[in-house]
Amino acid sequence: DAKTTQPPSMDCAEGRAANLPCNHSTISGNEYVYWYRQIHSQGPQYIIHGLKNNETNEMASLIITEDRKSSTLILPHATLRDTAVYYCIVRAYSGNTPLVFGKGTRLSVIA
Amino acid sequence: DARVTQTPRHKVTEMGQEVTMRCQPILGHNTVFWYRQTMMQGLELLAYFRNRAPLDDSGMPKDRFSAEMPDATLATLKIQPSEPRDSAVYFCASGLPNMYYEQYFGPGTRLTVT
């Protein structure tokens, strides 16, 4: 079973920041938070991951609360191409192990 | 731009026929995953390999599914005999056993069994 809880859907206006929440209240100390997204009809795509510090890359920022029980993925300036299902996944590192996908959040970016 | 490739992209077959799906992982990646996506079950792991050896195939129906890596550049997933409930999109992904490394997914094979 997935260890995360995400809202089923969200809307965001184009050009605005999209903030996607994820609850992972049972996360263990050795578990990382990963975010992937799946644009319609394509394979999932890695976005970002973190352990306890906030992370940023060219795609997004990941904010993890101090108690690590929740996190937020931020797309700073959402575009129509960011419309996708976003998956928050927690897993321990033991060498690129399988991903356990939940239902994710369907983000619709609206013009 | 290195990519995971999958063939065929689409397959329509009749119940009882054998289906073979192929995946070419990114060159140098030694970990290969097979996932299946359906509307009802979402994305789920079928099997994965490291250095061509199967590490976990507990997600596969053993009586009809088989996964192999004949060499480091080819992974195959076979279904024999196929059934309508096998209709799904099958994704292959590859990666390296590195904590900083993500999985790269292929475009998927959309299988329809009539």
Image (cartoon, helix red, strand yellow):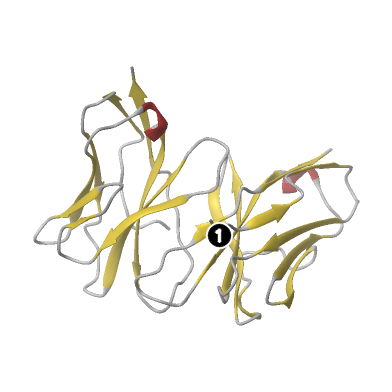
Query: Which of B88/B92 is in front?
Result: B92
Tell me what residue is drawn at x 25 percent, y 26 percent.
A15
Q: Which residue is most to the left?
A: A66
Q: Position of residue B8 (x, y in %)?
A: 77, 49
Quick one: label 1, few (<14), some, or many (20+) residues within 10 Å? few
| Rendered image quadrant of residue A91 | bottom left
Looking at the image, residue A65 sits to the left or right of residue B70; the answer is left
Query: Which of B93/A77 is in front?
Result: A77
Q: Position of residue B57 (x, y in %)?
A: 63, 71
Q: Is residue A25 above or below residue A9?
A: below
Tell me what residue is drawn at x 54 percent, y 48 percent.
A43
Q: Position of residue B38 (x, y in %)?
A: 61, 43
Query: Which of A54/B41 is in front?
Result: A54
Q: Position of residue B66 (x, y in %)?
A: 76, 68
Looking at the image, residue A27 sits to the left or right of residue B80; the answer is left
Q: Which residue is mark 1?
A: B2
Looking at the image, residue A69 sits to the left or right of residue A57; the answer is left
Tell me what residue is drawn at x 28 percent, y 70 percent.
A31
Question: What chain does badge 1 belong to?
Answer: B
Looking at the image, residue A11 sits to the left or right of residue A71; the answer is right
Which kind of residue does numbered mark 1 sit on? Ala
Q: Which residue is most to the top?
A: A111
